[in-house]
Amino acid sequence: MQALEKLSNYGSSFQTKVIFSLLHNKDLLLTIHDIVDPEYFDNPAHKWIVEEVLRYFYKYHTAPTLDSFSVEVKKIDNEILKISIIEQLRIIYHVTENDSKYVEQEFVSFCRNQQLKKALFSSINLLTDGKYDEIRNMIDAALKAGMDKNIGHEYIKDIETRYRVDERKVIPTGWKVFDDLLSGGLGGGDFGLIFGSPGGGKSWSLVSIGANALLNGYNVIHYTLELSQNYVGKRYDAHISGIAVNEVHNNRQEIEKIIKDVKGNLIIKEYSPGKASMNTIEAHIKKCIDLGFPPDLIIIDYVDLLRSKRKGGDRKEEIDDNYTATKALAKDMNLPVWSVSQVNRAGARDEVIEGDKAAGSYDKMMVTDFAASLSRRRIDKVNGVGRFHIMKNRYGMDGMTYLAEIDIKVGKIIISDKDFEEGADSIDLSRPPTTPSGPINRTLFNNSEKEYLRDKFFQLNK
């Protein structure tokens, strides 16, 4: 790539974006820290910031934080320079990442050309002295400048990076139990999965996670391969407004008033089952980013319905490929991904669904970072309850089961922090249960409860 002669030829906006990348892309800083010269920049404030970035990097092996800048700026005696630096930092931290890849590649090319130019000028004196080996070494070093130096997480050097609070950006689920287990929520590169039986509320759980992210100011892309995108939008309306999903069409004006206050933004994209692949999803995400919508959270309902790149293979192998590709997407784009999956027939009847009841392939759990199951039998659906079982958790404990109240009309899910004891009745038949939509009026034993007790009787006899 041919670069311009001087950095000033690129303009002030370009130089601002370069500094933004140095602060936010550690790989770039690691690659060119030894060939970046603050004198390349025109603005004295930019020169000071780049000097501080390099100084901090050589000491802590990462980019400085805004807090460290705040401390260092206070040490400056020149009030005019101080005011200029504060203003430039404000501009830098509000730069968009739309063309960051281009800016970074162009700047690396510029720095490499500058190094080669210096080497050529320095070799003139060496040439008159006949020091050809030194000339060769100098040119070779200049040609290798700007090569990728990222060899991984360096245990000793990267301790500052390892313990930064903002190093793992998490998106909370809104369920305290889950968020505590996940150290705040699912983070960039993480893949979370919820298992459940058909009609058990899996898709509603994804809406609940997505709506919580929206209300907290995050951008969400929700992919649906079962339901229409318009109906998924109505589910979000119901969850956020508290109006039953079958009544939202009669309350449009009220919903419009409520969603105006939503801090985040949502894109719902519908694909036909078996038509879209993980490459389709990735291309759409990149398109959204190019159009100025960088997502914070990806929801896929659900991965099993994506088309596999494997042609004519075993169905299990196709499913495994899709789940591996989903984890790769999360890591490559540094985004958290939530999805759901079915359980087999035996799991649909279990009081607590374990990992061996995953439909299609047990191996899908292997690539996930967090996996939970939602168990809701007939009597549970009648009473608006369920059980979440933590099947796998890379960030903490697993194996626990928690009771949940589930109002399927609006997708409100309240998870108790009390452990559920397997084998004990999850429903107190001595009183009507309470759900988020209010108590259910019923007699002491209705038909569903009789079926539940009959199932218990046969289980005990077995």
Image (cartoon, rainbow, N blue to C red):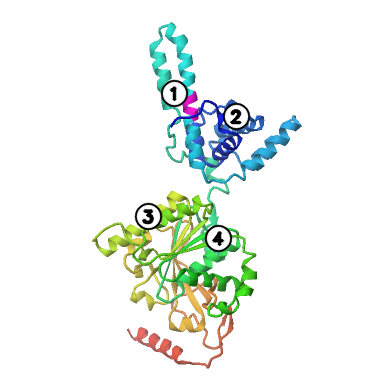
Say which of marks 4 and 2 sits in front.
Answer: 2
| Tally of numbered discs | 4
Q: Is residue 254 left or right of residue 148?
A: right
> Could you tell me if the residues under marks 3 and 4 are in contact, i.e. CB atoms within 8 Å?
no
**What kind of element bears circle 2?**
loop
Task: Measure how far apart labels 4 and 2 are at the Cα level.
Answer: 40 Å
Residues 212 and 402: in front is 212
**Image location (x, y in percent) of residue 117:** 48, 20
Dot 1 or dot 4: first in sequence order is 1
Residue 145 vertical position relative to residue 71 in the rendered view, above or below: above
> Residue placed at 48% from the left, 14% from the top?
122
Quadrant for the C terminus, please: bottom left
Dot 3 or dot 2: first in sequence order is 2
Q: Residues within 10 Å of mark 2 (few under 14, many from 20)?
A: some
Task: Measure how far apart labels 1 and 3 are at the Cα level.
Answer: 38 Å
Find the magenta span and give its range.
110-114
**Image location (x, y in percent) of residue 90:** 66, 42
> Residue placed at 69% from the left, 38% from the top?
86
Task: Measure how far apart labels 3 and 4 are at the Cα level.
Answer: 27 Å
Say which of marks 1 and 4 sits in front.
Answer: 1
Q: Is residue 349 left or right of residue 335?
A: left
Residue indicated by mark 3: 279
Dominant secondary structure of the magenta stretch? helix
Q: Which mark is residue 41?
A: 2
Residue indicated by mark 4: 172
> Could you tell me if the residues under marks 2 and 1 are in contact, i.e. CB atoms within 8 Å?
no
Q: Residues within 10 Å of mark 4 (few under 14, many from 20)?
A: many
Dot 2 or dot 1: first in sequence order is 2
